[in-house]
């Protein structure tokens, strides 16, 4: 992974909100108490606090330690991870890190659970994967749990048999990535979804696209698929789903080329065509994440993954004005990058009459400095909580931290199928 060009400025305060002490795991509370007692939240203060724990862990593990974070992590946390030699990237690049770095034996990720599990699926047997806060989940993934999706997939497979292929977005559990593997499908990310869907179409298969309805619809539109042939299953969360209750019934499914699961990302569904037009009228170019509604994406000047959006800012000419439609922490960091290059960056939701809630993805922001400090110190001492270890197939209750963990035989079977779906994605991408 290349450095992000993120800048850690000593006088810049952290925008991330502090978490209440009773919200931390018991093992992490001493680190949180110390953090909450700090006089301020400026990077030099945070760095001095972190160095007492991160530096001994780095010395203890040496080159075997790998720190990772996603672009959406709370504001300056990504800068801190990169400051300590870690890598920051989108979900595709993060998933490859264990697979491509066999010398890294202890991998610590500040991101959400499905991202850490994707790393674990591709990891070598002697590598361990840890998440700084197991309570960091994803609202989209919560509406596409295996117990929701698999019964519906069984109904579709009973009707269409081998004609059905599953494409599982990276924002899914390993259990759904395994479904993609079993049905001859693949994983995709927001950056490569068009390539993966086009690959599936070339096989002449009917596609079940799980879980993001907006990424699926935007991808279909981009590839010229008739949207009348892209029905969406009934909304999840309201009880058992019967496929015959799809709008248009079984006839709509029988005519379909791609079937959408009805989940979405709360961060990206806020963007509207009116927001895009407002910024266009002010002379801004608008770039947006494809988890946003189709109508907003069609109005924008371009859409793509976090890496795509970051490059748009990093490569914009001096004097450019960009409105970015994605997670708030990412945009705050993009503003800093843009200002250093003479580029004005605004958040797409920063329009009159719209009260933007918070500054980013609330679940991603559950990874904060005390979790990073505590995770590394506990690992060094051999006292890391088992809930923070991530194994393929884990299903974790983010309230109780109880883990439904497969036995060795079940996990081996899941890894086989899930890895197959991820390796197919990698092959599609690398083949170009």
Image: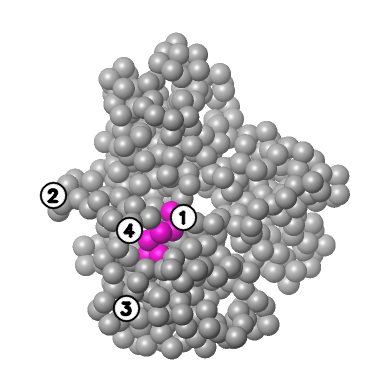
Q: Where is residue 267 in the image (x, y as percent from the top left)?
A: 59, 48
How far apart are the two marked residues, 1 and 2, measured between alpha carbons? Answer: 27 Å
Furthest residue toward right? 282
Q: Position of residue 373 (x, y in %)?
A: 42, 78
Labelled pair 2, 4 in contact (Cβ < 8 Å): no
Looking at the image, which residue is at 36% across and 41% down?
A: 145
Numbered disc 3: secondary structure: helix
Looking at this view, is 347 or 413 the one in front? Answer: 347
| Residue 376 circle label | none
Front of the two marks 4 and 1: 4
Looking at the image, which residue is at 32% across and 65% down?
A: 388
Return the residue at label 3: 378
Return the residue at label 1: 91
Is residue 347 shown above or below 273? below
Labelled pair 2, 3 in contact (Cβ < 8 Å): no
Q: Position of residue 375 (x, y in %)?
A: 37, 74
């Amino acid at each position: 992974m290349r450095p992000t060009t993120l800048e850690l400025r000593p006088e810049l305060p952290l925008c991330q909100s502090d978490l209440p002490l009773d919200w931390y795991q018991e093992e992490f509370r001493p680190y949180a108490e110390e953090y909450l007692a700090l006089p301020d939240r400026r990077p030099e203060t945070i760095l001095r606090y972190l160095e007492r724990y991160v530096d001994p862990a780095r010395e203890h593990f040496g080159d075997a330690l790998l720190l990772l974070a996603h672009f959406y992590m709370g504001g300056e946390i990504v800068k801190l991870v990169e400051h300590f030699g870690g890598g920051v990237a989108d979900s595709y690049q993060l998933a490859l890190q264990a697979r491509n770095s066999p010398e890294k034996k202890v991998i610590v990720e500040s991101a959400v659970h499905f991202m850490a599990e994707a790393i674990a699926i591709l990891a070598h047997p002697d590598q361990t994967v840890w998440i700084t806060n197991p309570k960091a989940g994803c609202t989209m993934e919560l509406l596409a749990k295996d117990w929701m999706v698999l019964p519906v997939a069984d109904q579709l497979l009973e009707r269409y048999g081998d004609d059905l292929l599953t494409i599982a977005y990276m924002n899914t559990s390993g259990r759904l990535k395994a479904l993609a593997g079993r049905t001859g499908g693949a994983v995709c990310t927001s950056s490569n979804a068009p390539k993966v869907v086009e690959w599936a179409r070339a096989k002449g298969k009917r596609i079940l696209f799980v879980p993001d309805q907006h990424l699926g619809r935007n991808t279909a539109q981009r590839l010229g698929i008739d949207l009348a042939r892209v029905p969406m299953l009934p909304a999840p969360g309201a009880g058992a789903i019967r496929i015959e209750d799809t709008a248009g019934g079984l006839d709509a499914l029988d005519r379909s080329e791609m079937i959408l699961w009805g989940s979405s990302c709360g961060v990206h569904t806020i963007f509207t065509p009116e927001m895009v037009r407002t910024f266009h009228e002010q002379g801004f170019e608008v770039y947006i994440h494809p988890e946003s509604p189709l109508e907003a994406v069609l109005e924008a000047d371009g859409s793509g993954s976090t890496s795509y959006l970051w490059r748009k800012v990093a490569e914009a000419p001096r004097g450019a004005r960009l409105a970015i439609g994605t997670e708030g922490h990412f945009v705050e960091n993009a503003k800093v990058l843009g200002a250093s290059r003479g580029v004005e960056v605004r958040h797409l939701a920063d329009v009159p009459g719209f009260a933007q809630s918070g500054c980013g993805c609330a679940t991603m922001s559950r990874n904060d400095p005390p979790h990073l400090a505590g995770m590394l110190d506990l690992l060094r001492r051999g006292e890391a909580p088992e809930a923070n270890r991530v194994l393929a197939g884990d299903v974790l209750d983010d309230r109780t931290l109880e883990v439904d963990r497969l036995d060795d035989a079940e996990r081996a079977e899941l890894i086989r199928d899930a890895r197959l779906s991820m390796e197919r994605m990698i092959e599609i991408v690398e083949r170009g």
